[in-house]
Amino acid sequence: MEYETVRTELLQAVANVKAPDGFRGAGKEEPAGDYCSVSLDGFVSTKSALRSREDVTAALRAHGWKQAGAGGTDESLLTRGTWAVFVTRISAPLVGEDGKMEKMLHELRISADCEGNS
C-alpha cells in the first residue's frame, strides 16, 4: 500500500536527524483511500538544525522523490506519483517570563498528502 511506503520512507528520512525527544507523528487513511496524510514534527538540536531539512530532502530524493520547489532555506516541496511532501524548518526564540531569550528553538515539520488533500 502506497500510504505505508510513504510513511516508512518519511520515518527513514528523519532517522538520522538529531531530535532529542524524537519525532511525533500521525497518519490517517480512510478505507476508501480518499484521505491520506502523514505528519511528523520534532525539535532538533541547534547543531543539526542547519542541515536538518537538507538531510531529510536528500534522503527522500534517494527514494525517488523529485524536488518541486524550495522556499529559501526553510521549506522544500517534493513530489512522487500522487503524493506531495513539504519539509519545513522553523526557528524561533524561547522567551522566559522575564522577557529575555533563553535559547533558540528549531523545529522540523514534515507533512505528506496524497492527491486531493494537498
Image (cartoon, rainbow, N blue to C red):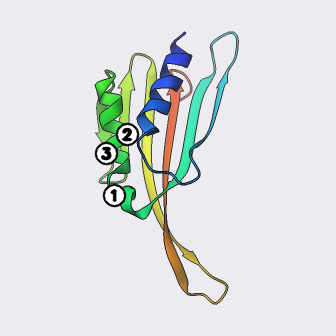
Instruction: Tell me the kind of residue under disc 2.
Output: Val
Q: Residue at x 55, y 87 (%)?
A: 100
- Binning the other alpha carbons within 10 Å of mark 2 as few (below 14), some (14 to 19) or many (20 upward) gives many
5 vs 97: above or below: above
Q: Residue 23 placed where, x, y %?
A: 56, 44
Q: Residue at x 56, y 40 (%)?
A: 40
Q: Where does the N terminus fall, quadrant-wise?
A: top right
Residue position marked by numbered label 3 in the rendering: 54
Q: Residue at x 43, y 53 (%)?
A: 89
Residue position marked by numbered label 1 in the rendering: 50
Is there a contact, CB below 8 Å, between mark 3 and mark 2? yes
- Binning the other alpha carbons within 10 Å of mark 1 as few (below 14), some (14 to 19) or many (20 upward) gives some
59 vs 34: above or below: below
User: Image quadrant of residue 64?
Assistant: top left
Q: Residue 78 placed where, x, y %?
A: 36, 32
Q: In the picture provided, is 25 more to the left or to the right than 10? A: right
Instruction: Tell me the kind of residue under disc 1.
Output: Leu
- Look at the numbered disc 3 and give the secondary structure of its residue: helix
How many numbered callouts? Answer: 3
Residue position marked by numbered label 2 in the rendering: 56
